[in-house]
Image (cartoon, rainbow, N blue to C red):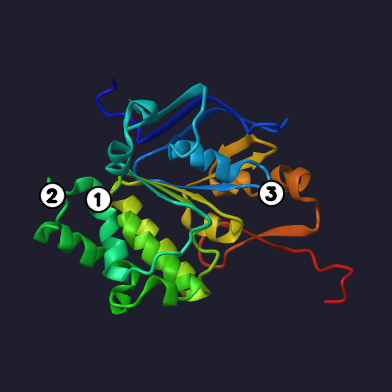
């Protein structure tokens, strides 16, 4: 094993859903320490499938996924949870636990025999709620929260795992603009602390502003992996999304932004 293995390595990975001709083919994908990577692409391009495979949720027969240099298939669920946090796109609130109890569930993989929270575990739980702005909600029931509040609580629970790799599928979809910006500010702090963060998102502008790399997918394949300014170009995006948009630059930082082409719309 390499003395300093990368947090997430995907190599020669292939996956097909049963009774479907669609196939994901990912020869190489890496999540590096200290980086936020955005996975973008149209619906059905394989973004969520790639994330579910990397999280160990979907079984695969061909290829290899390593977490900190270890084959993910050699790790049990507890072993994965100690190093990798995964927040899926769809989450249910069928259970009616309090927020503080939901966040504490993130400590499961770290609990000592008996399964009781130690003082050190409770400090982690409190800090994760502070970090996500959910501490004032701690005695509320999950089923009574708005979609955005619930998303932040579930993020706090994932952060309570103290993972080295963080996989997030459309985490800002239910958040207002203020909490979208705050959310990516949290991710920036986490990456600055050495985490590897991978985010599936449709919001290319947020991805461009906050992510170190962008991975563009189409029809189950990675077609471009690079800096935002290398991926968010008309040359890369037009064949996939069409040509009814323009690429500009943020007025404060040299990052690309995408916006509609209003010519001929009367706008």
Which label is found at residue 108? 1
Alpha carbon separation for disc pair 3 and 2: 46 Å
Horizontal and vertical percent position of residue 233: 68, 48
226 versus 154 height, above or below: above
- Total labels: the figure holds 3
- Disc 3 target residue: 42
Q: Find numbered disc 2 in the image and state the secondary structure of the residue it sits on.
A: loop
- Residue at the image point whose x is 44% and y is 65% from the top: 151
Rendering quarter of residue 153? bottom left
Say left or right for 256 vs 150.
right
Horizontal and vertical percent position of residue 181: 46, 68
Asked whether residue 6 appears in the rendered view, the answer is yes
> 10 Å neighbourhood of mark 3: few (<14), some, or many (≥20)?
some
Q: Find numbered disc 3 in the image and state the secondary structure of the residue it sits on.
A: loop
Nearer-N-terminus badge (1/2): 1
78 versus 3 height, above or below: below
Which label is found at residue 267? none
- Disc 2 target residue: 114
Rendering quarter of residue 113? top left
Question: Of discs 1 and 2, which sits in the foreground?
Answer: 2
Q: Quadrant of the N terminus?
A: top left
Q: State the residue in front, 175 or 108.
A: 108
Nearer-N-terminus badge (3/2): 3
Alpha carbon separation for disc pair 3 and 1: 35 Å
Horizontal and vertical percent position of residue 223: 65, 35
203 versus 144 height, above or below: above
- Residue at the image point whose x is 46% and y is 39% from the top: 57
Q: Residue furthest left?
A: 119
- Residue at the image point whose x is 58% and y is 48% from the top: 229
Q: Find numbered disc 1 in the image and state the secondary structure of the residue it sits on.
A: helix
């Amino acid at each position: 094993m390499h003395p300093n293995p990368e947090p997430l390595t995907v190599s020669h990975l292939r996956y097909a859903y049963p009774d479907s001709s669609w196939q994901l083919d990912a020869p190489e994908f890496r999540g590096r320490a200290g980086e936020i990577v955005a996975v973008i692409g149209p619906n059905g391009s394989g973004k969520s499938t790639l994330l579910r495979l990397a999280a160990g949720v979907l079984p695969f027969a061909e290829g290899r996924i390593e977490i900190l240099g270890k084959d993910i298939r050699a790790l049990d669920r507890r072993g994965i949870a100690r190093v990798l946090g995964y927040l899926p796109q769809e989450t249910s609130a069928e259970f009616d636990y309090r927020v503080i109890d939901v966040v504490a569930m993130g400590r499961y993989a770290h609990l000592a025999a008996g399964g009781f929270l130690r003082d050190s575990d409770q400090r982690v739980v409190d800090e994760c709620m502070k970090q996500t702005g959910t501490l004032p909600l701690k005695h509320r029931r999950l089923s009574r929260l708005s979609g955005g509040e619930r998303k932040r609580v579930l993020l706090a629970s994932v952060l309570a795992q103290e993972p080295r790799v963080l996989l997030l599928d459309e985490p800002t979809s239910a958040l207002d603009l203020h909490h979208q910006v705050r959310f990516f500010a949290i991710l920036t702090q986490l990456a600055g602390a050495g985490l590897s963060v991978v985010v599936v998102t449709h919001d290319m502008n947020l991805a461009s502003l906050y992510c170190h790399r962008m991975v563009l997918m189409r029809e189950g394949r990675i077609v471009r992996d690079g800096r935002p300014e290398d991926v968010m170009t008309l040359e890369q995006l037009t064949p996939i999304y069409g040509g009814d948009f323009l690429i500009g630059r943020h007025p404060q930082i040299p990052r690309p932004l995408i916006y509609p082409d209003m010519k001929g719309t009367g706008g």
